[in-house]
Amino acid sequence: MPSLTFVSPQGVRREITVSGNSSAMNAARLNGIGGIEAECGGALSCGTCHVYVDEADIEKLPPPSDEEGDMLDLVAAPRKATSRLCCQIELSDEIDSLILHIPETQF
């Protein structure tokens, strides 16, 4: 089962374990992670689930789609090389763990 660690802008870490296939956004919402609003419910149309994937973990994920890249151009926080929308991060047993940093603008 994959584990996710969400890190707030203040450095507070919260680790959750995810059973089954899910998106990081769904896991965050089910576990009450602050800063992941996900207003569009994962429809790739709002950017309110923006995270920075930890540099040590970025290679575990496929690159963002063109659609995700377009939406990342519109998020409130600065876009970085590790920016992703967590609605587009699909979790599976192949990904054992990820660390996701939540931008300050989402709090």
Image (cartoon, rainbow, N blue to C red):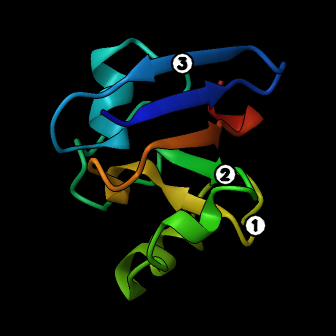
Q: Earlier in the sequence, mark 1 or mark 3?
A: 3
Q: Earlier in the sequence, mark 1 or mark 2?
A: 2
* Quarter of the rendering occupied by the N terminus: top left
Task: Name the one closer to the observer, 9 or 22.
Answer: 22
Q: Is label 2 or label 3 in front?
A: 3
Q: In the rendered image, which residue does mark 1 sit on?
A: 80
Q: Position of residue 76 (x, y in %)?
A: 66, 52
Residue shown at the point (72%, 65%) measured from the top left: 79
Q: Could you say whether the residue bearing mark 3 is in a helix, strand or loop?
A: strand
Q: In the rendered image, which residue does mark 2 sit on?
A: 52
Residue lying farthest to the left in this orientation: 20
Whether pointer 1 and pointer 2 mark residues with C-beta atoms closer than 8 Å, the reply is yes
Q: Is label 1 or label 3 in front?
A: 3
Identify whether 106 is placed above or below 92.
Answer: above
- Residue density around tag 3, few if under 14, some if 14–19, many if 20 or more, within 10 Å: some
Identify whether 96 is placed above or below 43.
Answer: above
Task: Name the one closer to the observer, 46 or 34.
Answer: 34
Q: Could you say whether the residue bearing mark 1 is in a helix, strand or loop?
A: loop
Q: Could you say whether the residue bearing mark 2 is in a helix, strand or loop?
A: strand
Residue shown at the point (44%, 31%) measured from the top left: 3
